[in-house]
Amino acid sequence: MTLLKIATSARLASYVETQRGVVYLNQTDFTDVAAVVMSVEDANAGILSMLHDLGFAIPTFIAVMSEQTVSADYLPLIKGVITLGEANKGFYNAQVEAAASEYQKNLLPPFFSTLKKYVEMNNSTFACPGHQGGEFFRKHPAGRQFFEFYGETIFRSDMCNADVKLGDLLIHEGAAKDAQKYAAKVFNADKTYFVLNGTSAANKVVTNALLTRGDLVLFDRNNHKSNHHGALIQAGATPVYLETARNPFGFIGGIDAHCFDERYLRQQLREVAPERAEEARPFRLAIIQLGTYDGTVYNARQVIDNIGHLCDYILFDSAWVGYEQFIPMMKDFSPLLLELNENDPGIIVTQSVHKQQAGFSQTSQVHKKDNHIKGQKRHCNHKRFNNAFMLHASTSPFYPLFAALDVNAKIHSGDSGRRMWMDCVKLGIETRKSLLERCSMLRPFIPPTVGGKNWQDYDTEIIANDARFFNFVPNERWHGFEGYNQDQYLVDPCKLLLTTPGIDASTGQYTEFGVPAAILATFLRENGIVPEKCDLNSILFLLTPAENPAKMAHLVDMLAQFERYVEQDALLCDVLPTIYRKNEERYRGYSLRQLCQEMHDLYVSFDVKQLQKEMFRKAGFPQVVMNPQDANIQFIRDNIELIPIAEAEGRIAAEGALPYPPGVLCVVPGEVWGGAVQRYFLALEEGINLLPGFSPELQGVYIEKGDVEWRRIFGYVLTQ
């Protein structure tokens, strides 16, 4: 075991005698430290306060000369006081070592601690996996490079469940159970389940545990495709869709306020399942995105107050959030912090830990908060829920993924989680201020003014603790969303959202010239910066506690550089050299503004912003003629044909179709192609052909070349 260090000031270093390494207070971030010894002067200089704010709970000692005293204000923050002198040196050093040992012993969370000790045992194994700690890989040159690239530990910690010392990840025993219980405590859940194949699987666990054929599910039309797969295709439930907002920039908004009105919902039931329209609690489950991909976060308290009495359970798909309970101004937006009673719905929250928390890709977790409805018929107990969990879990889990979820919970425990997320919020605010100062075309997606004063003129500390600075005030033109109520939604402070030229925010209409965000995103990737996503005139950058001021300053520099290229109308070969080289015949002689104008004109010609909006309005929903599960059965049985989408009007979709990102289905199996959805995919087809190098990723449809080199989008429809 590697021993953590003792941190001290230079003048005290000679007094500290330890087998551990010693590091000076000004040379550590305290993540490698097990105890701290400082002077009164160090404490007075603010180091003690800084240590407390870190939230690591490192045992701290103040060393004093015999005539010195320690302020009473410091005593609650320290482990003890050391009197300097040779006579007591051994005694006090033993105290420091005891505190350091205790801190290090309790530092690691349950599963990772057990896994680490097990790996250090160096057991000889004749069980899975066959690479045997990486040794199989090392017997071939390619395998050796693979082994050396990742390092020995990742291979040695990849093991099977043949040895019971690590517990059982499927039936939740031993260290695995302890880890999930610990995470439940940190995240304020009754039970937590670690999922190792993403929130796509986590959502299917929940929907398969709660829904069956004939159940009614209140369904956010913004939902990720995994919810369609689990609730509609696998479970066969009947959806009642809720219309959602899109704004002219291409941002994904929330559900309209009127959709949470009971009278409206019962009217929708009369259209979908009239025989159940008057039931007291007609919906087995409501599935709602707690935070959309584009940073619209729902007020969970409002959701439960408005529709909770109509639902047995509410699933808040929190793939794109999960940290809201660690940010004080977002308290009401966290379902897991709410006080609930026996009349409220059961609450399930799924979180993609790998997105903005600390986890390897595919790490997810399900938080179950339903003890308040125990004993009621609608309650889904652990055994039934775990049956669905095991349906979607591998019997050969990758232990490092599970360990990452365990460590993520530890990181967020106590004050450290709140401190790290507050630092992230503040850095995001400072970055937005820098953008407002340095850029004139690329604008942060925030209210321009608050209380009659420019957003950026407020102190960062004030902004970071007041939701007004991120609030979607109904009918304000800057955000372009319609149908919101007061305090219904918040801009996620940890998603840096920017708009690009092309939309007049005051009218929501196209301007004469525009800069599509796809071009900006390509420029950034060309220069080693990877944004999360872009769409129309919007671009998204995810912020996490991993960010630092230098990284954010570099991003702002590159955004400002892009603006200069637009203003100078630089040659495309200089700005986007990779795109230019791959498509030189198409773009020879082009300038940056010329490309921007052509893409912008394409958007205008199809009015793509309006098509996006219409697809998610009730009036624009494709007609439902078949249960999605039934349509999928016909797809499996090959009772389908592949036809151009241009010829698909009136035909029943056999496969859901969507652009990815964001992974939101535009047409669902069993719905009829036509209207805004068909026109939207034809607009994408036009762009694929006219603007090579900027093709979107499409799922559920297929791009194939026609007879005249025109690439067409095809989709599967049911045979007639």
Image: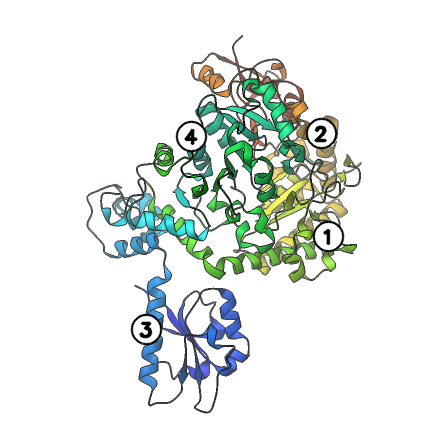
C-alpha distance separating marks 3 and 1: 54 Å
Report the residue at 53% width, 51% height from top.
325
Q: Is residue 466 left or right of residue 104?
A: right
In primary-sequence order, the first of circles 2 and 1 is 1
In primary-sequence order, the first of circles 4 and 1 is 4
Q: In this rendering, does residue 486 appear at all?
A: yes
How many other residues sit within 10 Å of disc 3, few (<14), some (14-19) or many (≥20)?
A: few
In primary-sequence order, the first of circles 3 and 1 is 3
Q: Which residue is mark 3?
A: 98
In primary-sequence order, the first of circles 2 and 3 is 3
Q: Indicate the amino acid at tag 2.
A: Gln
Q: Quadrant of residue 288?
A: top right
Q: Which residue is mark 4?
A: 208
In primary-sequence order, the first of circles 4 and 2 is 4
Q: Indicate the amino acid at tag 1.
A: Cys
Report the residue at 54% width, 45% height from top.
321
C-alpha distance separating marks 4 and 2: 35 Å
C-alpha distance separating marks 3 and 4: 50 Å
Q: Indicate the amino acid at tag 3.
A: Ala
Q: Are marks 4 and 2 in contact (CB under 8 Å)?
A: no
In this rendering, the label closer to the viewer, 4 or 1: 4
User: In front here: 554 or 304?
Assistant: 304
Q: Is residue 193 left or right of residue 547?
A: left
Secondary element at image label 4? helix
In primary-sequence order, the first of circles 3 and 4 is 3
Q: Which residue is mark 2?
A: 610
Rendered position, 447 above or below 519: below
